[in-house]
Amino acid sequence: MCPSQELQDREAQNRLHHFEMVPGTEKDRRPKGDPRRAVKEYARPAAGKDATNPTDLRPPAVLLKTVHYLIDEIAASPNLHPWTEVYNFVFDRLRSVKQDMIIQRVSGSDCVALLEPIVRFLIYASYRLCGEPVRLFDPRINDTHLQEFLSWLFDCYTAGSGPNPNQEEFQALGLLYNLGSVRAHQHVLELPLQLRTSPSVALATSINQAFLERNPVRLLRLAGGLSFLQTCALHRHLVTCRRTLLLIYSHGFSSRNCRFPLDRLAQLLRLDPPLAAQLCQLCGVQVDLENQVLFSKSAFTEPKPTALDCKRYHSESPENLTSLSGLLLQGQHETSAQ
């Protein structure tokens, strides 16, 4: 997974990641590199440097082995290291995979097989690391690369002639992740009828329609039917959706004599009552001692973006997944994250 010369150079320069070291040598003055664990790192192309040295390029079969290793043995393996560190290592090595793919012009089924688990990993990371300090996880950089991989994957689907059994899954993920995007919506409308009306894509389309119609109640109700990974794709839109629901209800139920049960509101928001009460407080919506919500259009306030910590409203820890490896490599369905 790593050219021998690079491994020797990084070992001599003490630039090995501890995931790549021979176990037991991590604390040595110069740790040894393990050829079975070392992975080619991303190197920004330098002016005048030939980046197409055949001895440094990994063919598609080796690239696929590398991607599976990174996800199965690093990302999904229980370890004592923070997942932000795991992510940064895997993310860098996946960029190197992308680099080798572009130089070799990998296409067709080989390209699809490589892109699908990478997209799943980046979508999962956007959920798991949501709210982490930018120095540890930058959501914008993750988003930029995810959008590129999604676009590349969809182009492969369009250009290819062979069957793509996972296309329904990724068309739905793309729409949920880019909820409200005109481009994403238009892309789905151009899909073949059979694919456009498939269960996952049809559900994602309905959720997108509810988003465009500013119907947060319907959107959140439909979101209850999503798989875990689908909710990971959707989750970045949910805080805004919940805030919109409270705004609409603050106008629709604005009355001194009107009381709305907190338990019922929590069901509509798809949150536990304590979290629903916290969100109400951030938006200036009063909750009395009897857990009754008092809506008032004059009292509603726009919460500061920093106050709406998305991670606070995650109701399930990603670490509790029964098989993260299966989720990212085979796309197995898991229970909803929200």
Image (cartoon, rainbow, N blue to C red):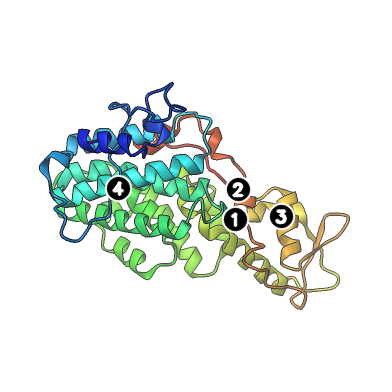
Front disc: 3 or 1: 1
Dot 4 alpha-carbon crowd within 10 angstroms: few under 14, some 14 to 19, many 20 or more: some
Q: Secondary structure at mark 2?
A: loop
Q: Is 13 on the left or on the right of 159, as rendered?
A: right
Q: CA distance from mark 3 to mark 4?
A: 43 Å
Task: Report the residue marked by disc 4.
Answer: 42
Q: What residue is rendered at 42% in x and 33% in y?
A: 18
Q: Position of residue 104 (x, y in %)?
A: 13, 48
Dot 2 alpha-carbon crowd within 10 angstroms: few under 14, some 14 to 19, many 20 or more: some
Position of 211 relative to 95 (above/below) = below
Q: Secondary structure at mark 1?
A: helix
Q: Amino acid at mark 4?
A: Tyr
Front disc: 3 or 2: 2
Q: CA distance from mark 4 to mark 2?
A: 32 Å
Q: Amino acid at mark 1?
A: Cys
Q: Which mark is residue 276?
A: 3
Q: Secondary structure at mark 3?
A: helix
Tag 2–tag 1 contact (CB < 8 Å): yes
Dot 3 alpha-carbon crowd within 10 angstroms: few under 14, some 14 to 19, many 20 or more: many
Task: Report the residue marked by disc 1.
Answer: 310
Dot 1 alpha-carbon crowd within 10 angstroms: few under 14, some 14 to 19, many 20 or more: some
Instruction: Please tell me in which quadrant of the rendered image residue 24 appears.
Output: top left
Front residue of this view, candidates 32 and 233: 32
Q: Amino acid at mark 2?
A: His
Task: Report the residue marked by disc 2.
Answer: 314
Q: Which mark is residue 120?
A: none
Q: Amino acid at mark 3?
A: Ala
Sequence-first disc among 3 and 2? 3
